[in-house]
Image (spheres, rainbow, N blue to C red):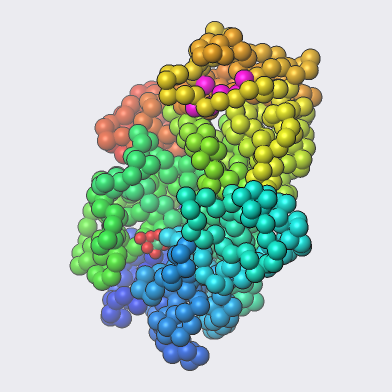
Amino acid sequence: MNKSLAADRLSLGTCYYPEHWDKILWREDLLRMLENGIETIRIAEFAWSKFELTEGIFTFDFFDEFLEVAKETGMKVIFGTPTATPPAWLTNKYPEVLNAAMDGVLYCHGARRHYNYNSKVYQELSKRVVEKIAKHYGPHPSIIGWQIDNELNCEKNEFYSESDTLAFREFLKNKYQTLKALNAAWGTTFWNQTYTAWEEIYVPRPTVSNATNPHEVLDYTRFISDSACRFAKMQSDIIRKYMKKGDFVTTNGLFSNLDNHRMTEESLDFIMYDSYPNFAYCLGTDPEHSTDLNDRKWSRNLTEVRGISPIFGIMEQQSGANGWNTAMEAPAPRPGQITLWTLQSVAHGADFVSYFRWRTCTMGTEIYWHGILDYSGRDNRRLREVKEIDRKMKKLSGAAGTAYEAAFGVIKDYDNIWDAQLDAWHERVDKLSQESIFKAAQLTHTPMDYIYLRENTTAEELIKYPVLFYPHAVIMTEQKVKLLERYVASGGCLVLGCRTGYKDETGKCVMLKLPGLLQPLAGVDVTEYSFVAPDDGRVYLDWEGTKVEAAVFNDLLQPLGENAKILGTYISNYYAGCPGLIENSFGKGRVYYFGGVFTEETAAVFLEKLNIANPYKDIMELPKECEIAVRSKAGRKFLFVLNYGKKPAAIELKQSLVNLYEGTKEVGRIEMEPYGTRVYELN
Ligand code: GAL
C-alpha cells in the first residue's frame, strides 16, 4: 500500500476557526499567516450549524464569504466535514444518534464525538450534510483537500447504543451465518452463555467482575473498527464525487479500536496525524506519559503513522500549552521545542505540518489549549519560532518525498493488539516488549519501522528488513505462518518472544504443543511456562557469555529438529540449565525464539548481536539524548539530529556534512543547543 502525501516541498499550515472570530479579523489573520510562512489552513470541522442551523435548510454564505477571503489572499484550504459535532436540534430530536456508556445511559449534547456510527438517522443526516457541503464547495479553487470528521474514535472508542447492538447482530450474522458457528467461536458453553436467538446478543454490557466473554469482546472490537471504517467510507465516497481533480481526502488520527490501515486503504489518499508531544509534560500526568523518553516517545506514534502512509501530514502540531478547563495542565513549549517537535514529524516522514491552532480560543472547553498566538493575537515568541521554522523548511525542501530508512522492523497486527487490550496476561508481556524495543532502538540510534500483517501483506514487503521482531504473536493463523515462512526462507531473520502462537483467531487457546502453528518454523517445543513470580527476582539466561534478562514470563524450551541450536540457557530459578533461547535455520534465513519478555537491555543485546545496531556510527556519534532519523531517495541522504535534552548536547561528525539550515560544511565536534535540531546532507 502506498498511500502517501505527494508534495514537491515541505510546507506549513495551521488550524483556523473563522466561526470563532469576528469577520473583521479574517483577512488580517490570513495575511499574517502567509507572512510567517503558513500557506494552508484547515477549517470547518466543527461547524455543522453554519451549514444547517435548522433541519433541512442549508446555507453556504458564511464559508462562501470566508473562502472568498482565502482566494483573495492566496491561502490554501483543507475543508473538514462537520460530523464530529452534531447540532443540538439533531441530538434533541433524534436521541438514537447518541452514543451510550456501557450501562446504556446516553451521552448528551455539549461536548463532541457523542454520536454513534451505526444510527441510520445519523448516517442519513451525515450523508446529506456532507453531500451538500462537498457539492457546494468542491469546485472552490482555494480548496486543496478534505478532512473527514475529526479524530475518529478519539475520546470515545467504545459504542453501546441500541443502534450499535442492532448493527453488531448484523455484523455477526454476516460473519458466522449461524448461531451454532457463533456459539462455537465464542466458546459459549463455558458458564452457560449459549445463545438460542440473535436477539439475545448485545454489545458488551456490565457484568459481574467485568468478565465479558473475551471472544465476544474481540469480535466487538473488530465490529467497532468496521463501523468507523464504514462511516469514513460513506463520507469519502461522497466527497470524491464532487472534489476537484488533484484534491485529496484525508483524516486526522491515530486512535484505537480502529484498523487505520483499512480505513486509509478504503477511504483516504493518505493519513494525517495530530502530534502533541507536550502531553509528556502535563502536570499530574499518568506514568504512561512520564517515562524518561518523554516527548521523544512521540517518535513511536510517528513510526506508526509512517507504517500507514510512508509520507504523511501533521494536521495538528503542538504550538502552545495543552489544556482544557477540565483537564491537562501543561507548560508552554520552551524556546526551541516547537521547532524540535516539527522536525521530529518531518524526520519521520511528514512533508506538511500544520499547527494547532492559529489563535487561542477565548471561549469553551479549550481556553487553555494554546495556539501559536495568545488571546490578544499580539506578536509573540511562538510566532517568531514558526517563522524561523519556515525558513528552515525551505532549506530542507529537497527532503520532500524521501523515504525513512529503517534498520529493522517490528511486526504488529490488529488481532493481537486488540487481544492484548482485553487479556491482562497478553497485555503485560506485550506492553513491556513494545516499549522496550522502541526505547532500545531510540537509545542505540537504530531507526525502526512498524509493519502490520494484513490480508494482503506480501513476503516481498517483509524481505527488505534484514531483521523483524514479532515480540508476542499470541494469535497465530495458517496464513500468517505461511507469510513468515516465506520471509525466513528467503533470507529474513525473525525474532519471536515468549507466549507465541497459543491462541487462534477467535482468541481461544489451541490444543497444540507450543508455539502451536509456528513450531516447525521456530524449531522449538515449549514444554512448560510460567510468569516470573515476585519472589523469583530477575531471571537471566546466558547467551553465549552474555547475561540477558528474560523478564516477566518464561517459556521453557527444547530444540526441535536438526537445524535448531540452543543459544542460551536459563541461569536462575528452578529451570536453571533449561534452554531459553533457540536459533533455528530455515531456508536461507533463521528464527530466534526467546523465552521471555524483552527489556530495554535485552532488546539492545539483540540489536547488537544481530548486527543492526547504530547503522550510522561511521558518519556520526551521538549522545543518548539525541535521536537520529535518515530520509533518503535517489542517492540523496538527509540526516536529522534531534536533541530532546534541556541541556546542550555534543555530537561528533566523523565526516564532513552539509548543515542544510546554513548551507555550510561541518565536521568534528558540534555543540547543539537545548532542544536543538540539525539536518545534514551527505555530500
Ligand atoms: C485534538 C482535536 C482538536 C483539539 C485539540 C486540543 O485532539 O482534534 O480539535 O481539540 O485536540 O484539545
In this rendering, is residue 319 above or below 301?
below
Residue at the spot 62% in from the left edge and 64% down from the top edge: 201
Residue 656 drawn at (x, y percent): 45, 27
x and y percentages locating residue 292 in the rendered image: 35, 34
- Residue beneath the point at 52% across and 50% down: 211
User: How many numbered marks, from 0 up?
Assistant: 0
**Measured from the top left, where is residue 453 in percent x and y?**
66, 44
Depicted 139 relative to depicted 61: above or below: above
How far across and how far down the image is residue 584, in percent? 72, 20
Q: Residue furthest bottom?
A: 57
* Camera-side residue of 142 and 599: 599
Magenta-highlighted residues: 550-556
Magenta run includes residue 25: no
- Residue lying farthest to the front in this orientation: 192
Q: Quadrant of residue 541?
A: top right
555 falls in the magenta region:
yes
Q: Quadrant of residue 521?
A: top right
Can residue 123 be spotted in the picture? yes
152 lies above or below 120:
above
In the image, what residue occupies the spot 72% across and 28% down? 513
Q: Residue at x 43, y 69 (%)?
A: 105
Residue toward you, 15 or 365: 365
Specify whether 283 is left or right of 67. left
